[in-house]
């Protein structure tokens, strides 16, 4: 049996290249060798291709890397330029919109000031309008040229049943009654629906009594708007009221007085006023307007 201790050890022999070469390097060289062999066969050249050197591979890799870097750089430059352009346009638009907003804010402030001023003027004008309307109502009510509504007193007067002309109601009798009602606090008076004004005459024309140049016939209904709680009592307590009652009873007039809660007195017809003109020889004459 041979002595194994005398045989050379395999560890003293160098290992083959395919054992010590890294796996990735073997794959790369094998792929390159196969590619060159394929190219050689295609040319009909029987020579064995030589694998490219590491320097050539590195150059190609660097060229590809440089191309990629250059492409990326160009794209980044273009993108930066476009971004700068867009940013400038956006900044310009923002500044323009800010200017517009500032201008609109100034206009809003001016309009608010105008609105406040107009509100104050409107309040002043509204207050004046209410005052003028109240004054117009008072003047219309007192002058008789505006319709009047409200509570008051109704006095109905008729001639004496005797039929004696001396015991008939005359214009001065109605004038005495209306004067007494005015004195007792009446705000508006009408006789048979004819509203009395400061220009209303009460005159006899034959056997008829004319009020506002309109003939009336008995019975005479005198309506006066005023405080129903005091108007009748003040009339009866006044000197002129007592004088009228005494005269009516003496002449035998048929009369009746009562409180009414809802009286409606029409407005008087506007009459053409008189005015003065200077005559041809310097004297003043009265004429009626046409």
Image (cartoon, rainbow, N blue to C red):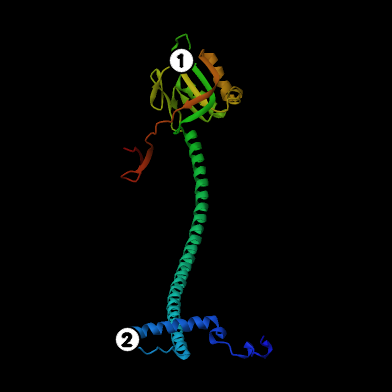
Q: Is residue 98 above or below residue 249?
A: below
Q: Is residue 140 above or below residue 167?
A: below
Coordinates of residue 232 in the picture (x, y in percent): 58, 23
The quadrant the C terminus occupies is top left
Coordinates of residue 94 in the picture (x, y in percent): 47, 69
The quadrant the N terminus occupies is bottom right
Element at badge 1? loop
* Pointer 1 residue: 168
Closer-to-camera residue (229/290): 229
Which one is closest to the eye, mark 1 or mark 2?
A: 2
**Which residue sits at x=54%, y=81%?**
23
Q: CA distance from mark 1 to mark 2?
A: 163 Å
Coordinates of residue 24 in the picture (x, y in percent): 52, 81
Residue 265 is tagged as none
Asked if one can make out residue 136 in the rendered structure from this viewpoint, the answer is yes
Coordinates of residue 100 in the picture (x, y in percent): 45, 66
- Is tag 1's residue or tag 2's residue first in the polypeptide sequence? 2
Image position of 203 (left or right of 179): left
**Which residue sits at x=54%, y=26%?**
151
Quadrant location of residue 66? bottom left
* Pointer 2 residue: 44
Closer-to-camera residue (40/203): 40
**Which residue sits at x=32%, y=86%?**
44
Element at badge 2? loop
Closer-to-camera residue (271/240): 271
Closer-to-camera residue (6/182): 6
């Amino acid at each position: 049996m041979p002595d194994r201790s005398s045989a050379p050890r395999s560890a003293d022999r160098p290992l083959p290249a395919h054992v010590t070469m890294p796996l990735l390097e073997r794959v790369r060289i094998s792929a390159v060798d196969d590619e060159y062999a394929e190219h050689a066969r295609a040319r009909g050249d029987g020579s064995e291709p030589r694998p490219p050197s590491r320097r050539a591979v590195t150059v190609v890799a660097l060229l590809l890397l440089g191309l990629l870097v250059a492409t990326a750089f160009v794209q980044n430059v273009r993108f930066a330029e476009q971004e700068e352009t867009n940013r400038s346009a956006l900044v310009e638009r923002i500044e323009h919109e800010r200017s517009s907003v500032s201008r609109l804010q100034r206009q809003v402030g001016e309009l608010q000031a105008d609105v406040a001023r107009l509100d104050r003027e409107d309040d002043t004008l509204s207050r004046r309008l209410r005052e003028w309307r109240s004054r117009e109502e008072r003047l219309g009510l007192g002058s008789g040229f505006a319709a009047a509504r409200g509570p008051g007193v109704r006095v109905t007067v008729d001639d004496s049943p005797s039929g004696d002309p001396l015991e008939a109601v005359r214009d001065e009798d109605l004038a005495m009654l209306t004067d007494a009602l005015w004195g007792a606090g009446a705000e508006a008076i009408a006789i048979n629906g004819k509203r009395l004004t400061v220009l209303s005459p009460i005159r006899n024309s034959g056997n008829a009594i004319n009020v506002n140049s309109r003939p009336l016939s008995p019975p005479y209904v005198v309506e006066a708007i005023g405080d129903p709680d005091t108007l009748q009592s003040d009339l009866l307590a006044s000197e002129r009221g007592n004088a009228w009652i005494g005269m009516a009873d003496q002449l035998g007039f048929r009369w009746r007085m009562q409180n009414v809660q809802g009286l409606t007195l029409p407005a008087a017809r506007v009459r053409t006023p008189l005015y003065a003109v200077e005559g041809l020889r310097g004297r003043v004459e009265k004429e009626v307007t046409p």
